Amino acid sequence: MHKLHRFARCCRQLSAMRRVPLLSTNEACSLHTSAVMQVSKGRIDEFFDSADSFGKNELPVKDRPGRSWSVAELRLKSSSDLHKLWYVLLKERNMLLTMEQAYKDAIRVFPNPERLDRVKDSMDNLEAVVRERNNALMELEYGESGATPTKTVTSFMGFKYEKELQEHIEPPHMHAVGKEYETPYLDDDAHMMQKLWEEKEWWKRRNMAEELGRRTRKDRSKIVYSERQLRSD
């Protein structure tokens, strides 16, 4: 507990030394997804949680975070608002990660840890909306998607995966990085690895199917038992 208060005191001292506004007060309040971070004169205080929540397992009702930003809501905003909202979410994520580490050092319970998940969902949705707009613009102007092109790469054990292509000064056949796009020679160990991997995946699917069947039979038996109980009553 003393570590958290000492941490907050250091934050106030840093905020008094440096006052660099990132967003105006109205912009920060209108775009923020949580009521936890309060806008204050010391701009660096926004990177840290409120001192009222120190030592509590759950935030007060008035300070509890709201839901994540949905894709439908973000599509209605302009590109300028999305740019501002991204940095607001980024600042809030930095605050939550900093406070989470501070609570771990103080051996305390971090209140409402679901805030990190909601901020991550909001940032993923925002990035998806920006990617949609970028792809639409690229297809309209150049007739192709703006996504980074990918190529199927085969590892030395025979596993295939998609990898994004990168720009290089030299052609792919002249540097070592380009060789990974070539199909390697698969020896007996690689073929054996592929057989063992397929067997492992087959057993996994079989066990999942058996577990699903057991749960289905168990649920049916419960329903039959409940119906018999109702008839007997």
Image: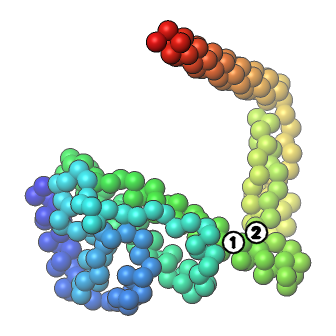
Residue 232: x %, y % from top left:
50, 9
Q: Is residue 56 left or right of residue 224?
A: left
* Residue 165 appears in the picture as rendered: yes
Residue at the far left in the pictured view: 2
Q: Is residue 196 among the parts visible in the rendering?
A: no
Q: Image height check: is 121 above or below 169? A: above
Residue for point 18% across, 67% down: 51
Depth check: 80 or 11 in front?
Answer: 80
Q: Residues within 10 Å of mark 2 (few under 14, many from 20)?
A: few
Say which residue appears at 34% left-offset and 67% top-offset: 95
* Amino acid type indicated by mark 2: Ala
Residue at 45% across, 62% down: 67
Q: Disc 2, disc 1: CB below 8 Å?
A: yes
Instruction: Tell me which label, 2 or 1, sits earlier in the chain.
Output: 1
In this view, 107 is above or below 93: above
What x and y, as percent, mark residue 30?
42, 82
Q: Residue at x 77, y 74 (%)?
A: 135
The residue wearing badge 2 is: 147
Scheme of colours in the image: rainbow
* Foreground: disc 2 or disc 1: 1
Question: Which amino acid type is marked by label 1?
Answer: Arg
The span from disc 2 to disc 1 (Cα, nearest Å) is 8 Å
Q: Secondary structure at mark 1?
A: helix
The extreme top residue here reads: 232
Q: Residue furthest right?
A: 143
Residue 115, horizontal then vertical, whole percent: 39, 59
Q: Read off the residue under disc 1.
A: 131
Residue 9: quadrant of the picture: bottom left
Whole-percent x, y for residue 201 in the image: 72, 26
Depth check: give the residue in front, 211 or 43: 211
Q: Nearer the viewer, residue 71 or 18?
A: 71
Q: Which corner quadrant of the image does residue 27 belong to?
A: bottom left
